[in-house]
Amino acid sequence: MKIPRDLSGADLVTLLPKNWDYQVVHQEGGHVVLETETPSHPRIAVPAHKTLRIGTLNAVLRSVARHKGVAEQDLLGES
């Protein structure tokens, strides 16, 4: 599945808690920090930009996929 080109940071911050059990911990400047409790407690910083760059979005998705043990395509299919 192709990575969306028009996904904003706010959209990603909405989708990760809804579909992958992440919670918003706090916001530092232009970044929203998310954390999950399953299977461990890693934190992810998502830029609160109007449109995320492809490399940034890919890095966030890769990190979530590696932590949750799923393929990146599965993450996009859920959203």
Image: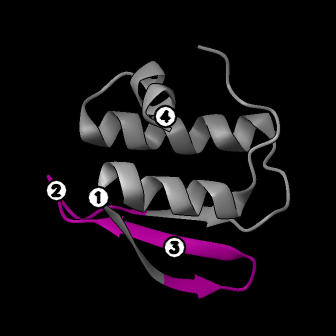
Q: Are marks 1 and 2 in contact (CB under 8 Å)?
A: yes
- The residue at 44%/42% (across/down) is 63
Question: How far apart are the two marked residues, 3 and 1, measured between alpha carbons?
Answer: 14 Å
76 on left or right of 40: right
Residue type, label 2? Thr
**Residue 51 image position (x, y, % from top left):** 84, 51
Q: CA distance from mark 2 to mark 3?
A: 16 Å
Label 2's element? loop
Q: Which residue is mark 1?
A: 21
Q: Which mark is residue 13?
A: none
Q: Earlier in the sequence, mark 2 or mark 4?
A: 2
Disc 4 versus disc 1: nearer the observer = 1
- The amino acid pointed to by label 1 is Asp
Q: Amino acid at mark 3?
A: Val
Q: Nearer the viewer, residue 47 or 1?
A: 1
Where is 58 relative to 21, above or below? above
Q: Going by the image, does 19 lie left or right of 39?
A: right
- Name the one closer to the observer, 72 or 15: 15
Residue at numbered disc 4: 62
Disc 2 packing (10 Å; few <14; some 14–19; many ≥20) = few
Q: Considering only vertical position in the picture, is 14 above or below 1?
A: below
Magenta segment, which residues? Answer: 26-43
Q: Residue at x 82, y 40 (%)?
A: 6
The residue singled out by tag 2 in the image is: 38
Tag 4: Cα neighbours inside 10 Å, few (<14), some, or many (≥20)? some
At label 4, which amino acid type do we have? Arg
